Amino acid sequence: MNSNNINLTTAEHSQLWSAYMNSSISSIMIKYFIAKVEDHDIHGVLQEALTLTTDHLEQITDMFTKENKPIPIGFTDQDVNVNAPRLYSDNYFLQHTFQLGIFGMFTFSSSVSLSTRKDIHQFFSEGLRKYNDLHEKASSVSLQKGLYLRPPTVPTPNEVDFVKKQNFLTGWFGERRPLTTQEITYLYSNIQRNSLGIAMLTGFSQVVKSKEIKNFIIRGIEIAKKHVNIFNSILEESQVPTPMGSDSMVTGSADIAPFSDKLMMYHVTGMITLGIGFYGLSISTNIRRDLAVHYTRLSAEIALYSEDGANIMIDNEWLEEPPRMVDRDELAKANK
């Protein structure tokens, strides 16, 4: 029996649906970036990202058509105005694509582990490799142009040692031990992601049409700034260098929006979901209790923020429903 003729599992269906939606919004945004980018090398990275996301859209559309599954609406050229003035710098375009590579690897690696059918497993495996290639190319160009924010280096002991005291785990009372390299890594990465998010939201806040959404976005900027300040203070306490801000990535454009309000809202809520995932990963790799408490508290804060965003999208009929189980009670009522 051809394994490709087996029905999609719920895991495969959901992962393909999510990949379609993410590729849909990414491809639309990158079209605008390509229309505005000036640097030749960064243009090449963006072109590679556009090819990758549009290929994924075509492949998933083909799979859903063969499976008689509805194809998501996602985002179209109506959600972008490539003729709008430049809203972000070339450096933002590059850093956005760098993070796209990271997010792609993060989501597609999970999708590989959830895939059973050979063709689905192959799709996500190949996609994982291509996102890795995109990440490597964006990293390389960032390094060449002096735009790459290298994680800090720290002096290390000359020999292996073992934890001897329970206070290695503590962090609230008494003298806190210095951060481990793992803890530094995730604090630094979360600062970078939040800083890029601040730049993205700042641009959105300048051009969004809806006053309600503008207020929602401004609230997100304040939340992200607070998280950056908390993470920075933890690094500074251990005398670890902190990443720079990203104010220079946003232009003064405020007249014509390059993206629809729907696209901006979806992008904000999508980034929150990924942020919660990375905070969860950070909790699993941190040993100091105070850090775990910080991540748990901040995750709850952005989860509530995300729920408010979802309610705005529902009110505007923008929230596309993911595949779900049929409602048996609803079917029974309909047949009365």
Image (cartoon, rainbow, N blue to C red):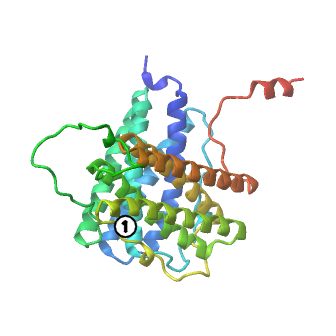
Q: Position of residue 236 (x, y in %)?
A: 34, 64
Q: Where is residue 262 in the image (x, y as percent from the top left)?
A: 65, 61
Q: In which quarter of the image is the C terminus?
A: top right
Give, as a three-letter code, the residue at label 1.
Leu
Q: Position of residue 289 (x, y in %)?
A: 41, 44
Q: In this view, does 136 lie above or below 324?
A: below
Does residue 151 appear to the left or right of 21 in the view shown? left
Residue found farthest to the left:
158
| Residue 57 seen anywhere in this rendered image of the structure | no
Q: Quadrant of the N terminus?
A: top left
Q: Position of residue 241 (x, y in %)?
A: 29, 66
Does residue 199 appear to the left or right of 48 in the view shown? right
Does residue 121 appear to the left or right of 330 in the view shown? left
Between 5 and 114, the one lying in front of the other is 114
Q: In which quarter of the image is residue 324?
A: top right
Q: Is residue 280 above or below residue 48?
A: above
Between 33 and 310, the one lying in front of the other is 310
Q: Quadrant of residue 38?
A: bottom left
Q: Residue at x 39, y 48 (%)?
A: 171
Q: Which residue is drawn at 28% across and 53% down?
A: 178
Q: What element carries label 1?
A: helix
| Residue behind mark 1 | 94
Residue found farthest to the top:
1
Q: Which residue is drawn at 48% across and 59% down?
A: 27
Q: How crowded is mark 1: few (under 14 residues within 10 Å), some or many (20 or more)?
A: many
Q: Residue at x 37, y 52 (%)?
A: 102
Does residue 286 appear to the left or right of 325 in the view shown? left
Q: In this view, does 3 lie above or below 62?
A: above
Between 12 and 214, the one lying in front of the other is 214
